[in-house]
Image: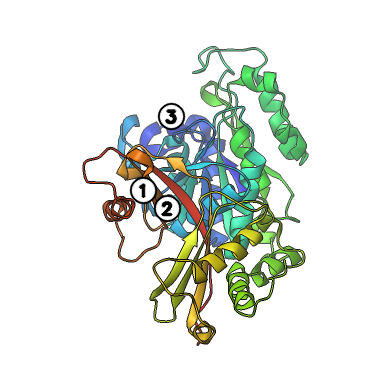
């Protein structure tokens, strides 16, 4: 299901203290939609909040283990939310975004904003206590919203999850003279056009809303709705307007853009089947086998499109017992495609890692190959932005000294340990100022034989 809820704190009874009765239709529809979502038994709930912290050119992903917050700033500390994050979904989602050229950042250590809290209070009251993902948006006008929604859809499909995507947003803030955004006589035109678009299932109207009318309205509903609409399952496009009213000078709509209750579990597409069958780890093994037999490794026919771009690649070779046997890579691409980069780095890891003897033919059955595709590195300002389970790290010091550490190394389970090991690898003495960068990695790992 993909849907829309508004987020005025006043409609939460603990905040409204009776004033919520002035928005009775909204309160009733919020409760009905929340119950409908819970009854549909999704695997994961995704909430898109326009009030989450923002950075230019990036989409925010709440990355703490739990989502916690209250409406205390609205004098309702007892209206609280405490829900588990779906960290696997967040990691896969970040990877899907990077594959589309979208930049994301982790939101950590923050209390939830009211854009997420208000819908979640209604869902909590309906019985929701399951895995929840919360996302923010980039800056207004920066675009890429449909791509962000498509990355959501792809993540759900790859993980085979039944996902509800809930956009949070209020419509015009300028409907009356006492409205919070001031009054504009044309503000109602925005609300009327949005409501009509939902009633007529005219999704293109929402996707291409007039920018001047949006500015007049002072709305924060369109961008989040575009993300939710782009995340819909094909074949579930019927729209439903559950409620609209404009008390307090602000328009509130509750709408369903697609209904999970009528959506069958998604079957993998031919492209997804190809993606499952195509293995960079097997290509790395094939490259080493061919090298040992003095053969040139042929490029595979029609690899998935995401591997037909340049990227830095590391190939790691381990024994079945987990002992390192070779690891060499590059931060920046030397070849036009990830496939070609993998072939080259596999041979380097097997035969040119100065720490080990070259791999021998008789060893191959007892070796496992792992390919790490690197996403672009980004600078970090503090250790708090590192996560050794999710991000690799680059540490650079004076005189060109630099070292790289991949994520997911068992012994380096804290950011402090990861930084210390990387600094030591680069030969940078303790106390010397360093530049720190992090990078996300998509790993392709061979499974050990049964």
- Bin the neighbour count of mark 3 within 10 Å (Cα to Cα): few under 14, some 14-19, many 20 and up: some
Q: CA distance from mark 2 to mark 3?
A: 47 Å
**Residue at disc 3, secondary structure:** helix
Q: Would you name the residue on which mark 2 appears?
A: 391
Q: Would you name the residue on which mark 1 appears?
A: 386
Coloring scheme of the render? rainbow
- Name the residue at 55% across, 54% down: 37
- Name the residue at 49% across, 35% down: 7
277 or 143: nearer the viewer: 277
Apparent side of residue 441 relative to residue 284 in the rendered image (left or right): left
x then y, percent, for residue 173: 55, 22
Q: Are marks 2 and 1 in contact (CB under 8 Å)?
A: yes
The nearer-to-camera label among 1 and 3 is: 1
Q: CA distance from mark 2 to mark 1?
A: 7 Å
Q: Which mark is residue 19?
A: 3
**Residue at disc 1, secondary structure:** loop
The answer to which of marks 1 and 3 sits earlier in the sequence is 3
Apparent side of residue 72 relative to residue 178 in the rendered image (left or right): left
């Amino acid at each position: 299901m993909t849907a829309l809820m508004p987020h005025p704190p006043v409609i939460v009874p603990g905040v409204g203290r009776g004033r919520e009765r002035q928005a009775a239709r909204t309160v009733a529809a919020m409760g009905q939609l929340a119950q409908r979502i819970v009854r549909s038994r999704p695997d994961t709930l995704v909430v898109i909040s326009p009030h989450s912290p923002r950075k230019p050119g990036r989409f925010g992903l709440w990355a703490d283990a739990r989502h916690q917050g209250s409406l205390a700033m609205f004098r309702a500390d007892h209206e609280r939310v405490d829900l588990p994050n779906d960290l696997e979904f967040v990691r896969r989602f970040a990877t899907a975004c990077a594959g589309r050229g979208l930049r994301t950042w982790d939101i950590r250590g923050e209390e939830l904003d009211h854009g997420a809290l208000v819908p979640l209070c209604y869902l909590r009251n309906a019985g929701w206590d399951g895995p929840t993902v919360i996302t923010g948006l980039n800056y207004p006008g920066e675009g890429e919203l449909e791509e962000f929604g498509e990355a959501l859809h792809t993540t759900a499909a790859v993980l085979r999850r039944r996902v509800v995507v809930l956009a949070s947003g209020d419509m015009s803030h300028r409907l009356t003279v006492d409205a919070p955004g001031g009054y504009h006589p044309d503000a109602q035109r925005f609300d009327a056009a949005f409501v009509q678009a939902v009633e007529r299932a005219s999704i293109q109207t929402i996707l291409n809303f007039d920018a001047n009318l949006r500015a007049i309205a002072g709305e924060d509903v369109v961008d989040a709705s575009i993300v939710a609409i782009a995340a819909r399952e094909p074949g579930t496009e019927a729209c439903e307007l559950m409620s609209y009213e404009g008390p307090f000078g602000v328009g509130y709509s509750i709408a369903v853009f697609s209904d999970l209750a009528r959506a069958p579990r998604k079957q993998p597409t031919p492209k997804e089947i190809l993606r499952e069958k195509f293995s960079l780890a097997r290509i790395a093994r094939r490259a080493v086998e061919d090298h040992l037999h003095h053969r040139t490794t042929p490029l595979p026919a029609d690899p998935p499109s995401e591997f037909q771009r340049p990227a830095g690649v590391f190939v790691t070779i381990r024994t079945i017992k987990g002992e390192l046997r070779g690891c060499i890579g590059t931060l920046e691409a030397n070849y036009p495609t990830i496939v070609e980069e993998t072939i080259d780095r596999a041979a380097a890891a097997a035969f040119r890692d100065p720490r080990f003897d070259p791999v021998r033919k008789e060893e191959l059955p007892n070796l496992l190959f792992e390919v790490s595709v690197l996403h672009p590195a980004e600078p970090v300002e503090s250790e708090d932005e590192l996560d050794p389970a999710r991000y690799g790290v680059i540490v650079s010091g004076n005189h060109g000294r630099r070292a790289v550490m991949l994520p997911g190394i068992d012994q380096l389970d804290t950011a402090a340990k990861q930084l210390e090991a990387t600094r030591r690898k680069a030969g940078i003495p303790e106390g010397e100022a360093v530049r720190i960068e992090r990078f996300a990695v998509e790993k392709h790992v061979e499974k050990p034989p049964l």
